Amino acid sequence: MWWFTTGVALAGLAAAGAGVATVLQAPGWLVVTSGGLSASASLVAPFIWPAVTARRQHGQQRWSAWTQMVDVWPWAANVDVEVGTGPVTAGVLDARRALVRFRLRRVELRTLLDWCTDPAAAPVHVVSGPAGIGKTRLAVQLATELAIEPTPWVTGAAYPGCAAAAVQAADALRRPALVVLDQADTRLDLVPMFAALASAGPSVRVLLLARTATDGQWWQQLRQSVANQQQAPWLRRVGHLPLLSLGGSAHAQQQLFGKAIDALAHHFDVRFQRPPQLGTAAPDAPIAMLHAAALVAVLRAQQRRSARPVDADETVWKELVDHEAQVWLAAADRYDAGLLPDTQRQTVACAALLGAKDEADAIELLRRIPDLHGTDRERRHRVAEWLHAMYPGVPPQWLSTIEPQQLAERLIFTEIARDDAFTEQLLADIPDHRMARILVLLGTAAPTHPWASRRLGQILRRQPDVALPVAIQITSGTLLLDQIIADCVDQLALPSGLVDELWRALPNAESTATLLRTIVAVTRRRLDQPALTAVDEARRQHDLANALRWADETLTAQHHAERAVELWRDCSQLDPRHRHELVAALRTLAALYRLSARYAEAVSLGRQAVDICQDLSRVDPDANRRLCAQAFGALAAALRDAGHTEEAVQVWRQAVALWQDLSHTDPDVNARWHADALKLFGSALREAGQTEEAVRVGRQAVDLWQQLSDTDPDANRRLYADALNSFGNTLSEAGQVEEAVRVSRQAADLWQDLYGADPDANGRTYAAALRILSAALGDAGQVEEAVRVSRQAVDLWQELCQLNPGFQDQFAGALQDHGSALSDAGQIEEAVRVSRQAVDLWQELSRADPDANQRWYALGLKGLGTVLRRAGQVDEAVRVGRQAADLWQELSRADPDANQRWYANAMLALSNAWLEHGNVAEARSAAQGAVAQLRALTIRKPYDVHRRELANAQRWLANFA
């Protein structure tokens, strides 16, 4: 169906015809042919617009399809439109015929009707669900209902390659219009469609039907592409309606089967002595499969064959193909085609896959059939006429195809898998306009059919310039397919222009590892090309550094980022216009240095980027505010990592002010940046001890992320949950324990939902949220729940460590939290065991990477000392407490701003241990040391948290008086 016919008819109401003709400078009755996937790309207006209303004598509005085209949808169920005129039978299952009465999806229908008639709604809505679930039938019924609205709607289908023209034609009607795009998750024309929709009037609605939901990579890539071009400010409000199976139980399946039996028996004029029975049905069998089973039962009765129960599983498609084959055989005799049964199947499969726009095209197409390859043209002409008699198309298509789609796919799959000689000729030199259809078909089968993987690889290697960009766009996100693509790219000398397609396919940090490997391989090849200019080399070095960064090859990425910075420095000296690229390269290199704990160098690069941005802003402030905001953010992050917390706060303050201005000017582009800057600013304030302002800023960040998440949950829900995590930490630090528990619990619940939907993407963040909630519960005295939640966090981090040893530091932190919770709950023996395990792991990590882990090791020692003291093991508590205090003293000398507070806390813990040991003099001395450290820190930084901790330490010291 949709892959076969892409020619286009544009029709309007009698009343609307003149309007369409005026806009398009054509008569009201207009047939316009187009390229799409089936005709030359030079043809124009590729669009089917099958929607004309007529008024019945009694005043009822109904629809009539004026065109005679096979792919025109009969949008009203009460209009008997022939979708095809051949002798075949399975076409009665075409959802566009609406042969079986629409009954069970009234709620979903009402949702779509409300969307169409809501003037404030986004102009796009997505309906998703597996093949055969009922998406097309729901769209047909929606068109029927819209036709009887007080102001009748025009509804039409836009076929592959035609989406933008469809929207433009709909807008030209100047009346309510619905454009339906089937198989949206495999289409290549959605970005141009969104561009056309951006300039269309408010009366146009677009319904996307997709097998994959909006959490799939196709939608994320589309959103990113459209957002980058700022084409759709309403993008975050796009609705999504997932369809669930109607056949979830045996009773429901039997009912659906029975209703289909009634409709099909009436259509074929078949009478039953006993109603047919449904046999074994696949779990959650889609409605198309149940209808196919009903058709098999009716055909058996028509041919007076066995009345045994019909199974609703994959075998039903095989039996329907066999029924179709009987028609092929009878027709072949009439046309003297002289085809063996196997050749007949191959011929129909070839036509279904590749199609033909005219008789000559069909005759040439038949050369791909092994038994017809060397035959004369006259014989191939007879075979072409045989095909046309069974599957007649209408201009500009000469052939239609088998319906429903699942039946065509079954035949094509079977023939490709069965005969290598046929497959080799079928898939050789694929026309460009057929590439997407073939790759979608093979990509669908590849995860479960080795032959499909093999054939997909062959096509990519034979026609890389055509196939690879298409394959990446429509199949990336599946590990197996990414692997095939990456392997092919590794082996190819890349054609011109392909690399840019590959780079644009990189969906930021959440790409699969194999697609990242593809980008790395391609970008390395680009660097190997001879005679590169300095600018070209600089761009490619920067591209490769970014790809390696996302692929976690940090050290190699640093090498290329350093080279990019060096080249951009030279280029910007020769041409100051390249300073923007230099700033971007400096930010990338600074981020890589931070990952390697080269904090001082990262700060230096950040300062350089800010200096350049400020110079640029003096010349043109408005044009460079965004660049400055990004540079300030990069510098603040580096300062924070380097322990320069106070300066980081000041730089974040400047960044937030810039993002706030930018967000007011253009919220669609900048609101997320503003929200993220607020969150990071709040974290920096918390670490600097400015808890009162940190709470205020953190609350602002959470409120803004909540607004963004409410309007676009798919894009912003994770970031909202992350902001809640950060805010929960801040509230705990500020001593607002009850609100900290509430906010942390809200964050953990959100992450739990996200983790359930996608464990691979959200396991780490859910585990981190559990740690934060556990700490908040402990602070609030809810010790039993704190133990339960901290145990969950330990279990999850342990599981994640088995997959990625790089999470060992998080596992150690979770163990430490759990030990503290156990101690608070009075489970002292278990607390000691768990705390020792945490300290042992921190010690091992600290030896391997002291810069990254020594502070955490010191915190672990302090926590273990406290647990040992509570367990009555005072000698060891003193030894461990002294070890912790010594380590914090060393860290404090190196960086007092970052560590003096923690050194004072370690001294207070040691004072407690000495007192339990009975050595009052040592306890007093340690307490005096803690007070001295906190007094000096409070004088230097008179923050709330420092004052509060100094007061606590002074109260403790007063006990010794």
Image: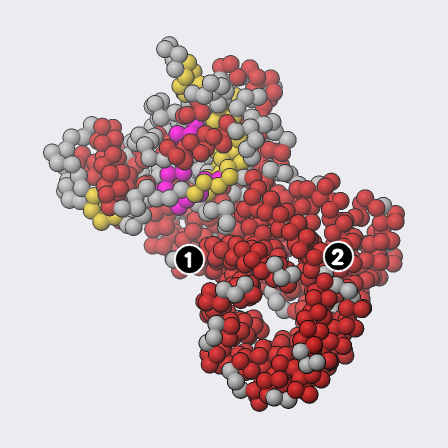
Does the magenta portion include 234?
no
In front of the other: label 2 or label 1? 2
Q: CA distance from mark 2 to mark 1?
A: 47 Å
Give the SS element for disc 2. Answer: helix
Along the line of sight, the residue nearer the viewer: 305 or 653:
653
Tag 1 secondary structure:
loop
Q: Which mark is residue 853?
A: none
* Observer-nearest of 849 and 782: 782
Q: Earlier in the sequence, mark 2 or mark 1?
A: 1
Residue 216: give x, y in percent of width and height.
50, 50
From the viewer's perspective, is 957 left or right of 67?
right
User: Residue visible at 58% across and 77% down?
Assistant: 863
Question: Which residue bears the numbered disc 1?
Answer: 447
Mark 1 is surrounded, within 10 Å at the Cα level, by few (under 14), some (14 to 19) or many (20 or more) other residues, namely some
Q: Which residue is mark 2?
A: 652
What's under tag 2, amino acid-wise?
Trp
Q: Which residues are magenta?
A: 126-143
- The answer to whether 190 appears left or right of 152 in the picture is right
Identify the image's colour scheme: rainbow, by chain, secondary structure or one colour.
secondary structure
Q: Residues within 10 Å of mark 2 (few under 14, many from 20)?
A: many
Q: Where is the N terminus found, in terms of image quarters?
A: top left
Q: Nearer the viewer, residue 620 or 686?
A: 686
Judge whether 307 appears above or below 784 on screen: above
Mark 2 and 1 residues: CB-CB less than 8 Å, in contact?
Answer: no
Split into 4 quadrants, where in the image is the C terminus? bottom right
Visible residue check, residue 389? no
